[in-house]
Structure formats: structure tokens, C-alpha cells
Image (cartoon, helix red, strand yellow):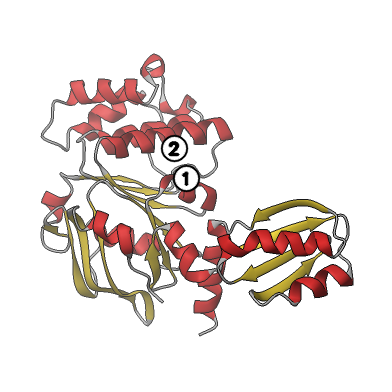
Amino acid sequence: MIFGCSGSTWDRMIEMTPIVETHDLSKRFGDVIAVQSLSMSVEEGEILGLLGPNGAGKTTTTRILSGMIDPSDGYAEVAGFRTDMEAESLHEVIGLLTETPGFYERFSARENLLYFAGFYDIDAEKQVDKYLETMGLWDRREDRVGTYSRGMKKRLALARSMLSEPEVLFLDEPTSGLDPESARGVRELILKFKGEGRTIFLATHNLEEAEELCDRIAVFQNRLVAIDRPEDLRSHMFRRQVVVELESVTEAVASGIEELSFITSIERDGNRLIVEMDDFDKNRPALVRRTVEKGGNVISVFEKEHKLEDIYLRLVREEAGK
């Protein structure tokens, strides 16, 4: 089940330029299929969230797209470069943040960045100083990295990934293990990079983070299960539901609502009734009137919100049950 774009989403995206394209991309490690027949495109300036359980193929996909490993079948193009044939050129236009970035702990932050900047044809001192300031590390630039907190190391790793000002960023669990304040700071930096027009791949297990940051999400289970905007996935997968919260749910209220011709389903949850119906906006007032007529003491009426977690779990469970 792979959802694409529909309506205004499609109209918006066809005006954009794909910067990443994969064509029947597969990767096997012996008898294990890590990625299977992946075909997708990612638009310039988009944040794409890669979601899936451990071992679903997210990291393998990232490693292929960043030119670290070659696919077993198919191919991918990133910023105009074949990842399996032009890795050296590719590395000039991408940035990579791994979940556990490594540094020379006995060197200062500035010394570390100057070393890594030497791999690029850039003004090393200018770029290093720029991103030490951008990441809020300027005052600690001469301190040994071994004295840095985990959050500071993540920001230093982001600085390293940005030295060449890449067109495409691959971020693997950029906020894992961070305290809330540090995580918020990293998320703000990611949005800043998006505002500069960069394309970002965000692999994360933090579904709230994915919903906050990502334009689209791609759910993996060794293959691409679904890719779309969260709001479009919701409309594809869930019917709109209204929740009627009452002081108590009586049989008279429940049966009275069931008698309405536009009701398609009704579910009891404690002192709440969760109702699906035809023509949601038109019939919601009639639902409330019938509830009151049947003696229901209404506390609140609201539309049920399906979070990204609901979407993700349904997709993964359906895929696992095939």
C-alpha cells in the first residue's frame, strides 16, 4: 500500500524539482533482503521522514543514498549524481549525521572541524567559524570535545555535516538521547536548514518529531510501505470520527444515536461515544441534538485526532500481517 500525492498536494509538488530519485533499489546481505525494490522521488527543499522498526531498511537506504554502500539491484541519483558510480562527487554535495558520530576527543571542537574541513575544497577557517557560531558552540570552540555534553556533540556533528553547505542532508536520529531543551535546539536548526532550501532525510523513532518537522513521511518494512504527507495518510486510512463525551452513556442515548440514518458506526469508550457518520460536517449538529433529546448530559463534542503514531502502527501491523 503506497500512497502518492493527490489534489492540491500533487499540483504543488509537480512544480518542484526532484533532487533524489531511486529506481527499483534493492540491497541484500547474503540471504537477508534489507531493502526491496525501492522507487521514490524526493523534492528539493523537502524534509522526508524515514520511519520503521529496527531492521526495516532505513539505515541501509541512507547508506546507499549517501554513497557509502552500493545497491544489489537498481540505482539512485542524488543531486544529479549516481550514488554507485560518482560517490566522490556525491560527497561534495551531501552532509551526513550518523546516530553515534565520532570525534577526536582530545582535540578541541575547532581542531576537529578544521581536520574534517580539509576533505573539501572550501575556505576551512571561514566555514568552521561560521558553523561553530551557528550551532552555539563559539564560546567552547577551544575546549576538548571530550568535555562536551551529548547535546553539544550532536550540535558539533551537525556543524561537521554542514561545512561544505550541502544540498542534501542525511540525519540519523539527530535528537536521540538528548534532554528536551537540547532536542528542541536541534529541531530548530533542522528547520533553519530547510528554510535555506536544503533537502533533508530524517530517520527517527520519535513520531512527534517527525510530525512536527517532516513534509512527508516514508514508512519502511524492508520495502516502502507508504509515502505521503501525514494529513493525506490520515484521510486515506481513517474516516473522520466525532467523540461525544457525556456524564454517563445510557442505553437510551446510544440506541437513539444508532437509529439515525447517517450513522455508520458507534463505539463506546467509558463515558464517551465514538461515532462515524456520512457527511460529517452537515450531520454533526443533528447528532448532538439527538443526544440531548435522549437525555444525554453532554460535556464536550470534538473530532477525534489520529496522530502519526496511529498511522504508523496501522501501516506496520498491516504489513507484518501479510
List the residue tagged with mark 1.
212
Disc 1 versus disc 2: nearer the observer: 1
Residue type of the residue flagged with mark 1: Glu
Q: Nearer the viewer, residue 197 or 169?
A: 197
Q: Secondary structure at mark 1?
A: helix
For this view, does 89 lie left or right of residue 204? left
Q: Residues within 10 Å of mark 2 (few under 14, many from 20)?
A: some
Residue drawn 51% across the image and 36% down it: 183
Label total for image? 2
Residue drawn 19% across the image and 36% down it: 164
Image coords of residue 113 (percent x, y): 28, 29
Q: Quadrant of residue 222?
A: bottom left
Q: Nearer the viewer, residue 98 or 243?
A: 243
Quadrant housing the N terminus: bottom left
Q: Quadrant of residue 249?
A: bottom right
Image coords of residue 7 (percent x, y): 32, 63
Q: Residues within 10 Å of mark 1 (few under 14, many from 20)?
A: few
| Separation of marks 1 and 2 at Cα, in angstroms | 9 Å
Residue type of the residue flagged with mark 2: Arg
Q: Secondary structure at mark 2?
A: helix
Label at residue 74: none
Residue 211, above or below 264: above
Image coords of residue 25 (percent x, y): 25, 72
Residue drawn 81% across the image and 59% down it: 292
> Does residue 103 appear in the picture of this structure?
no
Residue 194, above or below 145: below
Q: Are marks 1 and 2 in contact (CB under 8 Å)?
A: yes
List the residue tagged with mark 2.
187
Residue drawn 25% across the image and 58% down it: 11
For this view, does 92 lie left or right of residue 128? left
Furthest-bottom residue in view?
Answer: 322
For this view, does 297 lie left or right of residue 120? right
